[in-house]
Image (cartoon, grey):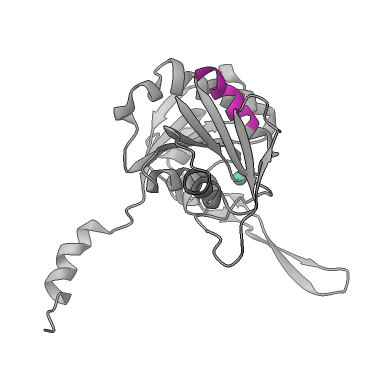
Amino acid sequence: MKFLVANDDGIFAPGIKMLAETLAPFGTVAVVGPTEEQSGMGHAITVHRPLRVQAVDVIPQSAKSFTVDGTPADCVKMAVQGLGLTPDIVMAGINLGSNLGTDVLYSGTVSAAMEGVILGIRAIAVSLCGPQTYLSTAGHYVRKILLEDPGILNQPNLIPQDGLLNINIPAVPIEEVKGIRVTRLGVRKYENLFEKRVDPRGNTYFWMGGKPQLTESSDLDIDIVAVEQGYVSITPIQFDLTYHSLVDGLQTILNKEYI
Ligand code: MN
């Protein structure tokens, strides 16, 4: 199997290395990562300046590695349409930090995977919901779930052609993971979103941060809840944002022929 590994934390982040190392025994791995961290860039692409690509040798387990001085979506686009790579699957991550609920809309990790889907390549996004300390938990469950038992990658019908699987792994020791839940996206809300600070010249500035609010729901079918309770969450995601149930009603009222 030919893997293309990308991320949004940047080529030097520990998660992309862990993902490449985890996948290497199961196929050929090419890595394309942003030169600098691109978390929170969503699906942005770079069209107003050139993109520089550099071959690098930071991940020994990969057949080839490149950096692109652009966004996560740029990286995957560049790999396939610029460098001519032909992966069987795009793997994005392992992100340091969760990508749950509405946060998938901001996520460079999920967007890197979605770019694969747009290019007609199946894709999976993987995030560790906490600090680097538990990266080995994420590596362990990526290998187990994707390649061994149940081995999602060996059952292609489980990976949608026009969508991706968004996997979030709780940041706990391997033996404390309670299980796997297939979920739907929740709504992620933050408290104390902006920190107001003063710069050395006395000017006020704001820094976006915030702490996710704990959800009141106990519905393990929601991704946020599943992870909070110690499960690996797997959510199938598609890019069709159409509000399907509104289409018929709006068409009846608004559809018009002018000529
Ligand atoms: Mn990130």
Q: Can the viewer see residue 213 in this picture?
A: no
Compared with residue 60, is residue 149 higher up or lower down, i.e. above or below? above
Residue in the picture at 55% in, 47% down: 75
Residue 26 percent across, percent down from the top left: 50, 19
Q: Residue furthest bottom?
A: 258
Residue in the picture at 12% in, 79% down: 257
The C terminus - image quarter: bottom left
Residue 47 percent across, percent down from the top left: 54, 64
Residue 213 percent across, percent down from the top left: 55, 49
Residue 145 percent across, percent down from the top left: 45, 22
- The overriding secondary structure of the stretch rendered in magenta is helix
Residue in the picture at 49% in, 30% down: 3
The N terminus - image quarter: top left
Q: Is residue 23 magenta?
A: yes
Task: Give the residues in magenta.
Answer: 17-26
Instruction: Determine which quarter of the picture holds residue 202.
Output: bottom right
Instruction: Determine which quarter of the picture holds residue 207.
Output: bottom right
Residue in the picture at 15% in, 74% down: 255
Left or right: where does residue 54 sit relative to residue 126? right
Query: Residue 193 versus residue 8: which sits nearer the camera?
Result: 8
Query: Residue 68 versus residue 202: which sits nearer the camera?
Result: 68
Left or right: where does residue 102 sit relative to residue 61? left
Q: Is residue 168 magenta?
A: no
Ligand 1 image-quadrant field: top right
Left or right: where does residue 201 sit relative to residue 19? right
Query: Residue 19 versus residue 99: which sits nearer the camera?
Result: 19
Compared with residue 179, is residue 202 higher up or lower down, i.e. above or below? below
